[in-house]
Image: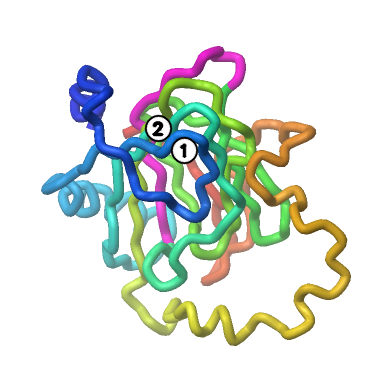
C-alpha cells in the first residue's frame, strides 16, 4: 500500500479525483488511488485481526481506497453504512502536514456519548464500530494530503446484526427536531472551537453485542 501511494505521489497531477462524498466538506476534491485487485486481498488478510478484536465471525464487505484528503478537508460526524460497515478499520498509509504540530485526529463518539480523539501515524490501523459509533474529523486539515484505506466487515450471524437503513428511518421519532436551537452544532464539520484531548487508543466502552471491549484500538500493520 505504501508503494502504491509513493507511485501516485510521483504523478500527483495525474491522480484521479473522487466523486463528492456527503460526509466530506472540502474545497478541493479528495484524490483517489484504487486498490484494484488488492482490495479483496486486503480484506482477507486483515479479517482475522478484526475477528480477534470484535470477538465475532465476520464477512468482508469492502476495502476502499486509497483516499487522499486535501487541504481544507473536514468530515462531519457520521455513521457508516448500517448493513455492511459494522466492524471496521482505518489503515493510515501516509500524510504530509504543513506543520507536524497540527495533526488531523479522528474523533469517535463511544456508546456513552463521550468523544475521543486519536492521531494516526503511517502504518497504524484503527479498529472501530463505524455503523454504531459517530465518527468524523471536524478539525480543518492543514496539509497536502492524508491517505488511508477503509476496511469493513459485517457479522456472519444475522441474529447479532441484521439492521437495514429502513430500520434506522423507522426508529427516528417524529419529534426529533423539537428543542433544536442551532442548525449546526458541535458535531458538524469544521466546528471545532476547543480541541479534544488526544485519547488512549484502547478506550474501554460498552460493546453493543455482548461484553465490554475497546471502542478503538491501534495496531501497526
- Whole-percent x, y for residue 93 in the image: 34, 30
The secondary structure that dominates the magenta segment is strand
Quick one: SS at disc 1?
strand
Tell me residue 107's x, y (percent).
61, 43
Left of 20 or right of it: where is 42? left
Q: Are marks 1 and 2 in contact (CB under 8 Å)?
A: yes
Which residue position holds label 2?
124
Quarter of the picture containing the C terminus is top left
Q: Measure the alpha-carbon separation of dots 1 and 2.
A: 6 Å
Q: Is residue 176 above or below residue 37?
A: below
First in sequence, mark 1 or 2: give its number: 2
40 left or right of 67 in image: left
Q: Residue at x 55, y 45 (%)?
A: 75
Graded by Cα atoms within 10 Å as few (under 14), some (14 to 19) or many (20 or more), the crowding at tag 2 reads: some
The residue singled out by tag 1 in the image is 218
Compared with 55, 114 (above or below) is above
Residue located at (66% from left, 61% from top) = 111
On screen, residue 105 versus residue 163, left or right, reads right
> In the image, residue 6 lies at what x, y percent?
23, 21
Residue 79 covered by magenta stretch: no
Question: Where is 72 relative to 9, above or below?
Answer: below
Q: Residues within 10 Å of mark 1 (few under 14, many from 20)?
A: many
Which residue is farthest left? 37
Write down the region rendered in magenta: 87-102
The secondary structure type at the circle numbered 2 is: strand
Amino acid at each position: 500500500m505504501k508503494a502504491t501511494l509513493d507511485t501516485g505521489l510521483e504523478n500527483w497531477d495525474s491522480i484521479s479525483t473522487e466523486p463528492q462524498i456527503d460526509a466530506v466538506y472540502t474545497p478541493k476534491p479528495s484524490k483517489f488511488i484504487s486498490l484494484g485487485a488488492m482490495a479483496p486481498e486486503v480484506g482477507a488478510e486483515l479479517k482475522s485481526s478484526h475477528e480477534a478484536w470484535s470477538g465475532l465471525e465476520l464477512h468482508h464487505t469492502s476495502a476502499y481506497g486509497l483516499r487522499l484528503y486535501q487541504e481544507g478537508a473536514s468530515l462531519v460526524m457520521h455513521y457508516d453504512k448500517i448493513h455492511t460497515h459494522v466492524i471496521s478499520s482505518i489503515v493510515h498509509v501516509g500524510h504530509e502536514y504543513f506543520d507536524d504540530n497540527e495533526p488531523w485526529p479522528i474523533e469517535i463518539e463511544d456508546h456513552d456519548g463521550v468523544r475521543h480523539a486519536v492521531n494516526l501515524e503511517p502504518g497504524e490501523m484503527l479498529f472501530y464500530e463505524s455503523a454504531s459509533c459517530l465518527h468524523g474529523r471536524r478539525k480543518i486539515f492543514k496539509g497536502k494530503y492524508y491517505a488511508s484505506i477503509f476496511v469493513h466487515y459485517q457479522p456472519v450471524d444475522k441474529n447479532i446484526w441484521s439492521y437495514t437503513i429502513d430500520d434506522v428511518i423507522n426508529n427516528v421519532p417524529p419529534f426529533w427536531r423539537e428543542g433544536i436551537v442551532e442548525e449546526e452544532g458541535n458535531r458538524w464539520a469544521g466546528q471545532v472551537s476547543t480541541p479534544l484531548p488526544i485519547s488512549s487508543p484502547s478506550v474501554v466502552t460498552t460493546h453493543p453485542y455482548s461484553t465490554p471491549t475497546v471502542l478503538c484500538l491501534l495496531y501497526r500493520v
